[in-house]
Image (spheres, rainbow, N blue to C red):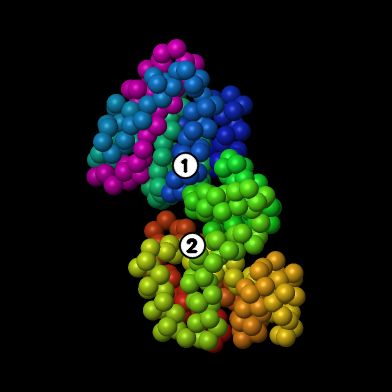
Amino acid sequence: MPGVSPEKLIERLAGGKSIPAVVLLGTDHYLREMCRNKIIEACVPESARDWAVARLSARDAGWDEILGRAQTLPMLAPRQVIIVEEAESVEKLGEKARDEVLAVLGSYFESPAPFTVLLLEAAALDRRQRFFKLLSEQALIAELTIGPESAAALAAQMAKDLGAEMDPEAAAMLADILNGAPARMRIELEKLAAYTQGRGQITVADVEALVVAARKNTVWQLTEMLAGRNRAAALAFLDNLLREGEQPVGIVGALAWMYRKLIEARDLPAQTNGFQAARQLGMRPEAAETAVRQAHRIPKKDLLAGLAALAEADSQLKSANPNPRAMMEFLIARLTSSAA
């Protein structure tokens, strides 16, 4: 079956369409929990969830047990959901054991239980292996990622769930600088909702004050080093950020947002003051003035090349088996080269 977005998956289930198996593929805990809960809500009445929802581990439970449970008629419920965690563990089995799993799973898919939704959860799967090929043919695979527009809408909805309203531009900025990662957006929105309680909606200025300012080391200081082509200092600074627990994908997302702002600032006269730049860039005056100053230190072609390098790094970090540190060091080397 073709892959679907989380939104389309939920729409399909809500429509009552029968699906023998669903694969939630990705590491974002918020999206996984959201999809899992929506699937359960769409398939099992609340009063029946104690006995019509089961959670098993592919690593600990045998697949005979898992599929046996899937073929057992649920009590007092039209459908049941069998959640299979760590489905990727199949790929780590020996060849004989893996072949046995594929055989029993293939046999089940030939005549799946119409009253069961088999929900497989995996951080990542090797698309070259037979396990993924079988699932892609027989199950509905939902990639736990969302596009920029969906991420902004999700941020606004999260804010509403927390009892706050959010300006659309602020939602887009938050989604952008956090690279659309729902779990991280939720954490920051909890802070923003508390920060703006009783003051109206969450604005761009609030996001800058709490989120961008909290990442000023990953944005302003690192950008300063990149603008000065100070590769040694940038690599040392990167090492400190990674040691302190900053996630590479978050650093890349913050830098990409800043590079876009620098490209906008590059088109403003170098003498533009902070208040004038703030209106053009949608930033606080102090931040806008810094952006204009730094933007004119870097040729526009290098800013554009740098933005392309950041997009490539973002894609590589989301690949199946990335080496985050090596990729980040290579990225810093590119951004501090004479031609970005």
Residue 206 image position (x, y, % from top left): 61, 59
Give the answer, above or below, for where 176 lies relative to 51: below
Q: Quadrant of the C terminus?
A: bottom right
Q: What numbered label is drawn on residue 32? A: 1
Residue at 51%, 31% (x, y): give it. 39
Residue 17 appears left or right of 102: right
Which class describes the residues within 10 Å of circle 2: few (<14), some (14-19), or many (20+)? some
Marks 1 and 2, Cα distance to the nearest angstrom? 19 Å
Q: SS class of the residue under badge 2?
A: helix
Residue 92 visible here: yes
- Write the start and end of the magenta stretch as one range: 67-94
Give the answer, above or below, for where 155 lies relative to 254: above
Residue at 57%, 42% (x, y): give it. 162
Residue 97 appears left or right of 190: left
Q: Residue furthest front?
A: 198
Q: As shown in the figure, which amino acid type bears the numbered disc 2?
A: Gly
Q: As shown in the figure, which amino acid type bears the numbered disc 1?
A: Arg
Give the answer, above or below, for where 216 lies relative to 227: above
